[in-house]
Amino acid sequence: MNPRAGPIVNLLADGPLLPRRLRLFMGLLLCLCLSAQGTVTATQPAVVVYRPSAEVAVRGALIQIDERRSTVTVRDESGQTRTLPLSPATMFLTGLRRLPTDLSLLPTYVSAGATVVVTLVSDRVAVIEPEYRWHAYPALWVEDLVYDIKHWSLTSLGPDALLSNEANVLALISVSLTCLLCGLVSSLVVTNRMAFFSDALAHCAFAGVALGYILLFMDWFTSDDGVLLCMVLFGAGMGVLIAYVRDQTTLAIDTVIGVFFAGAMGLGAVLLKAMSSLGSRSSPENFLFGDPLAVGGRHVVLLATVLLLTVGFLLRQYNRMVFASFNASLARARRVRVKLGNYLFIVLLAIVVNISLKMVGALLINALLILPAATAGNLARNLRQFFWYTAVLALTMGIGGFVLSVGWTPTLGGRPVHLVSGGVIVLLGVSLFCVSIVVGRWVRGPRAVVRPG
């Protein structure tokens, strides 16, 4: 019986309230309505409801994604390693708003060892979504900002524009922050005659990165963030040891640096061989020459944090460091804590060098620390100009070199030759230095006030 007919049936059952003929007429009318409704319902076509295959969620630690983006490997909560097939429809959701992102950026946005939730439909990966903790929110905000910039560029400038690619936007921001960071400390590196010292710190990172990956392989760390921390601590430790041995012996500073340089390179060679023997797939090429296109939001936040730390140090110590570089004895007589300032600057320099390695690599980072100040020394008339020219020239080198490397692809024998961003940045800096030698006399006058080095 139709439930909607319940009140009418009750009304017909109350005999004393209605006449007998009226009750018979209403009962006949009710039967006709119910039969007509049943006839219509029976003649309606059957509605087929599509029900997709059951979804299966796999939660675990990301191990790697295939270079051809055909499979992803995760270690689930039970400790079992599972290789899951990808499809062209696989979505990668990231950011605070869980925006769909290009799957090729998965290794950039999510480091190895991070927790991800992989949703399977019909035994194929449909969605990959990383799990974030509270400290990841600044990086997620950066990634959302990059997504908005890409969307604006796609609608305003077209798909072929530089900013229409998320990797290019992240790389441009990272290169700008790195070059500004190196430019701010470049003047102090040159005035304190620490060019060879900064080069030694960069090459000490060989041992630091190899040690970090070995510890990562041994499960001491859960992600690449531990490798970066190991690099920074190892570089800072080596820098402090160099300064300590210099103060405790009568050896020249270049001799002390040469000893530690050789020791760090030897240790790095041993550890790199051990790393390859353990089965690590990390490529040393990216470490040697850098790869700005492999930078994620986390690295941008880290660079911004180090930049704020550097600005705070310079506001406090810059004038004292410059004073001590010209006459350390007079600075001590004026109650300037020269030794403490030197040690703090060595630690800061080690942080800057190791954080910047991902941009230009270990072989080229020293150029970013020397070329801006060397070029500004040919153009500046006083120390104030020397500092600001250094920062501006470093930004010009970084932004100009990156845009040139991405926007220009020369051909050799009919084949395209892709340029390395770090190498183009350094070559542009060398070109600016050569130009400064020619035009320096007309810009600064017959005699330079600043004679760095």
Image: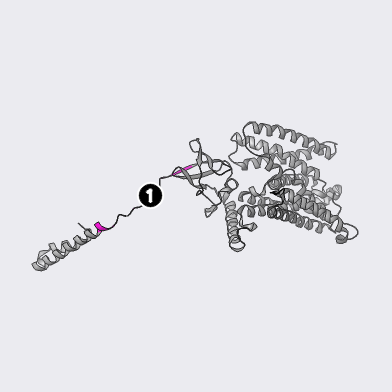
- Residue 53 counted in the magenta span: yes
Label 1 neighbour load within 10 Å: few <14, some 14-19, many 20+: few
- Give the main secondary structure of the magenta stretch: loop
Residue 183 higher or lower than 261, as above or below = below
309 or 128: nearer the eye?
Answer: 128
Q: To which quarter of the image does residue 380 belong?
A: bottom right
| Magenta highlight range | 41-58
208 on left or right of 118: right
- Residue 374 counted in the magenta span: no
Q: Residue at x 53, y 53 (%)?
A: 100
Residue 446 higher or lower than 216, as above or below = below
446 on left or right of 135: right
Q: Say whether residue 19 is visible.
A: no
Q: Residue furthest right?
A: 446
Q: Residue at x 19, y 60 (%)?
A: 35
Q: To which quarter of the image does residue 199 belong?
A: top right
Quarter holding the N terminus is: bottom left
What residue does disc 1 label? 51
